[in-house]
Amino acid sequence: MTVELRELRRSFGGTVALDGLSLTIEQGELIAFLGPSGCGKTTALRCVAGFERPDTGAVFIDGADVTRVPANRRDAGMVFQSYSLFPNLNVRDNVAFGLRVRRRPTAERHDRAAELLELVGLGGFGERYPHQLSGGQQQRVALARALALQPKVLLLDEPLSALDAKVRVNLREEIRRLQLELGITTIFVTHDQEEALSVADRVAVLKSGRLEQVAPPAEVYDRPATPFVAEFVGTMNHLPGRVSGETVEVFGQFLPLDGTAPGEEVDVLVRPEAVRVAPADDGRGFILASSFRGSIARLRVQLDGGGEVLADVPGHEAVRLSPGLKVDVTLVERPVLTAPRTAVAAPVEPVS
Amino acid sequence: MSGLSSSRRRGGGAGWLAAAPLLLVTLVAFGIPVVVLVVGAFSVKGGGLGFDNLTATMKQPYIGALGSSLKLSAVVALGGTVLGAFLAQAVLTSRSGLLREAVLTASGVLANFGGVPLAFIWIATLGNSGVVTAALGLGSGALYNFWGLALVYMYFSVPLMVLVIAPALDGLKPQWREAAQNNGASTWQFWRMVGIPVLGPSLLGGAVLLFGGAFAAYATAAAMVGASVPLVTLQIADALTGNVLIGYENIALALSLDMIVIALLVMAVYLPMQKRSSRWLA
């Protein structure tokens, strides 16, 4: 089933949450809505679920306009951010809630609940109550409940945000496995870029209610469409550069421009893995700090002219490149994005 | 290990010492009267112990008063619970923060209104010569009966219910309603399958509180209806003071014991449910 958002606009008082959002999600696709708080990603999801009605624009599910269809008749399963299991019902009855609403026979309800609990790895948990489950288990039950009615669309509203790091990784892989197994069209809202990049077929980056870029994860990371996407997804260095024709000069190197430069004096946006660092007595800076991360080490280099730059080097080089060492900094030759000039070179760390 | 044990012992001793004044007051103000009450209730004329007094409370006019008190308390509890819960829900879901604050503050004041001043307000308003009675040309005597008394008790019971149920209503997560909707439930189905079961113990707790308040109320009824509506509290007062007949003090104590037993039965139903509800709404 495809989902189409067409020119959605939604305001809350004077705050614009969605500003003409248009997007089509293909059958069986998992798309992640990624963006900072207040970018409109949850509002967009709630428009699909039917909990918000757009001021203008329309939502289509499987070609049918559902903009004015009430939430309880949308045929979309949803998992909420915080635990939303009904506390007075045990796990089995939570999962079978929708079937009970539809007055399905008890045996069918129990069979379906058992089948779904097996699917999410909680077989044998049917008699327990929500307060007897961990956070991760509760979200698995919520996922089973969302799938119980075999919805056309699965909506996930930051389903992992309340869980600890290890459980998050496990559960997001579990969600992806289930989504692929069932082939269900899925929208996954998150503010965590790693989560979005790791599970989605495509990532839609939103800012101020507008779509900045929608593309496969690798493209969003390697070829960000806008400086905002470049800064929001992954870590990005801002290095002072001077535009010269189709190239930009930075650290004495001439790199091809990706897109149009906003002026002559610009910031060049370079990822830490595109920065090379080598020991040099007459180098342009020294290593301020080194953070070992297993396969790589992240170096923070203080530049002689002011400012800092982050560089990722292979982990085994961390011993050689220790803090205090004088180094030279060069950049990998590939097209670079530019942004209006800021005062000094500085890295922009990811939001989460 | 022994150090830990001894420190626990010391901690426990200090705790008892700190609680001693309160325990002493409780013993004097509650424990001793209960003992006197129980002994008196089982003391029969001519000396010795027996069930004469308790048996007497199961006969007229006392059993009638007991029944009337139970009926009044049940009406006030039911009416107060329904009206209070609806009022609280309306106020809490209102978009006006001012309305919420105003109603909760007013409820805090009105819930503590009682006794002779409450009776006076209603007598001055809807009594035989009350200002509203005169202004609207209403007939006399409307206030001085069972339903009039129930109306007056509602005046403090509804606000009390608002105060009691508001935190529980606040504890109902919006996600529960949305999850129910997402599973195809209508508003009524949400309340029937989730909302009311989750709130049930809190509603029952509030109802028990209203029941107890109406069951034990004395001054308002005494000032308003006197003996025209037989209530157990009025019977106890009459028997203790020898207002009608003398030598019936132990009957009063037996009636009080009946009330304690009824209160304990109600609490025995309420407490386990309240424990479960607090876990759900935490």
Image (cartoon, coloured by chain):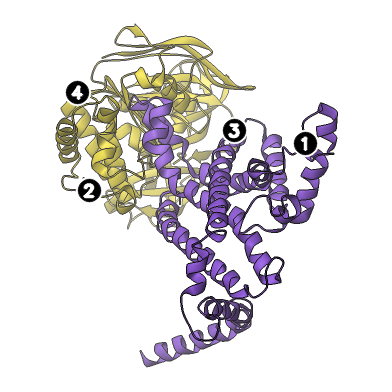
Report which residue position mark 4 lands on: A183
Task: Classify 10 Å Cα crowding around label 4: few (below 14), some (14-19), many (20 and above).
Answer: some
The x and y percentages for residue B205 are 50, 52
**Residue A2 location (% of width, % of height):** 29, 13
Asked whether, in this view, residue A210 is left or right of residue A5, the answer is right
Q: How far apart are the alpha carbons under marks 1 and 3?
A: 35 Å
Mark 1 belongs to chain: B
Q: Which amino acid does label 2 sit on?
A: Glu
The residue carrying pointer 1 sits among few (fewer than 14), some (14 to 19) or many (20 or more) residues within 10 Å by Cα, namely some
The chain coloured yellow is A
* Callout 2 crowding tier (Cα within 10 Å): few <14, some 14–19, many ≥20: few
Amino acid of disc 4: Gly
In the rendering, at what x and y percent does residue B64 appear? 55, 54
Q: In front: mark 4 or mark 3? A: 3
Discs 4 and 2 carry the same chain letter: yes
Q: Which of B80 and A244 is in front in this view?
A: B80
Q: On the image, numbered disc 1 is attached to which residue?
A: B140
Q: Do labels 1 and 3 share a chain?
A: yes
Q: What's the CA distance linking mark 1 and mark 2?
A: 61 Å
Query: Which residue in the structure is indicated by mark 2?
Result: A127
Q: Which chain is purple?
A: B
Measured Cα–Cα span from mark 2 to mark 3: 35 Å
Q: Nearer the viewer, mark 2 or mark 3?
A: 3
Residue at 77% across, 32% down: B139
Q: Which chain carries label 3?
A: B
Q: What element carries label 1?
A: loop
- Residue A337 appearing in the image: no
Q: What element carries label 3?
A: helix
To the question of a shared chain for discs 4 and 1, the answer is no
**Rendered image quadrant of residue B81:** top right
Query: On the image, numbered disc 3 is attached to which residue?
Result: B90
Above or below, B38 relative to A79: below
